[in-house]
Image (tube, rainbow, N blue to C red):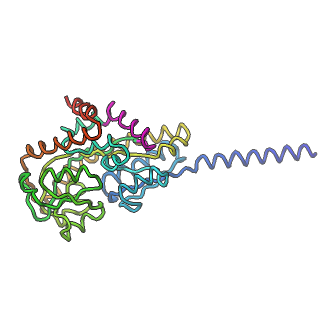
Amino acid sequence: MKLMSFTKTALVTASAITLSSAAFAQDVTLKLGLVTPTDHPHSISAREFARLVEEKTGGEVVVTVADNGSLGSNPELLDSVQAGIIDFTVSTPGVLAGYSASMGILELPYIFQSIDHMMAVTRGDVGLQMAAEYQEATGVSVLSYFGGAQRNMITTDATINGMEDLAGLKMRTWEWSVMLDWWSGLGALGSVVAFPEVYTAMQTGVVDGAENEFTTFTTARWAEIAKNVSLTQHAITVRPFIGNAGKIAGLSDEHQTAIREAALEAADFDVALEGELDIQNMEALAADYDVVFTEPDKGPLIEASAAVIAGFAADEGLEDLAAEIAAVAN
């Protein structure tokens, strides 16, 4: 009788442990933070990533998305990912360059000749090499590359028909010294303003304008107060989707695979979405916001930007990487 009781107790205990382990295995919640508004393509694509992860793991991994800068600025979000406070974010190459310079080259104006060039770099050997080197240097995993939208300039009062019209203008930039150098090279005065504060900064005259994508001009409502857009087309956006490498490595092989697959699929989803929204939002800027477009001579802008690219590459020992990126376009 005692043996039977012991056996029965052991079976009950084993069953409880099994059930407890199963429940624990399914209780994986990961956090993703962004600075972009809820209806921005990066936020939409982040939610697509969360949906894909849940689908691929049968609900065993849940990703919660906090956007609109609710968890901090881009530098703060990167720090939080590296520290393991949150698990994922969509960041800018310039911010990532604060920890390892090579990623910053993707941010440089006129580094890409076309969307096809950007896709070939970020989806090819160069993008994989850059991701591997960044993880080794920082412990942050570059899972994929969002982006694809063209970036242009928007101003409150000034009309930019050429590089000479930038002289003395206070133009918003983010937390990266290279962009300050770029604005200076164009004759403007770069001013660091956090993304959620740009609207107020333009409204109050702290800055005269900014540069970004058509989608940002509408979703962040910059076009409500800035009615001049110059089609400089100076950048094709690349936004690395990053995660804490240690946290990802601690998951099961199946969950790691699901996360990596979901990141790649969400990135392609984002590029397609940004391309569609580029067209829609350019039309909306004219129809709904009465924005006036100008088409400046890009020659002087490209020439000035080439000096920034060369200077950054030389300072950081990245001449070979810059040459590899250029070669992909040929």
Above/below status of 21 relative to 133: below
Which residue occupies the extreme bottom position in the image? 204
Q: Which residues are magenta?
A: 122-141
- Could you tell me residue 278's position as x and y percent? 21, 49
Decide if residue 67 is on the left or right side of residue 302.
Answer: right
**Rendered residue at 7%/56% (across/down):** 165
User: Which one is nearer the viewer's eye here, 207 or 226?
Assistant: 207
- Could you tell me residue 74's position as x and y percent? 35, 55
Which residue occupies the extreme front position in the image? 315
Which residue occupies the extreme right position in the image? 1
For the N terminus, the image quarter is top right
Is 246 part of what is drawn in magenta? no
**Rendered residue at 20%/71% (across/down):** 204
Is 124 part of what is drawn in magenta? yes
Prevailing secondary structure class for the magenta stretch in the rendered image:
helix
For the C terminus, the image quarter is top left
- Could you tell me residue 210's position as x and y percent? 19, 58
- Could you tell me residue 73's position as x and y percent? 36, 59
Decide if residue 220 is on the left or right side of residue 68.
Answer: left
Decide if residue 111 is on the left or right side of residue 142.
Answer: left
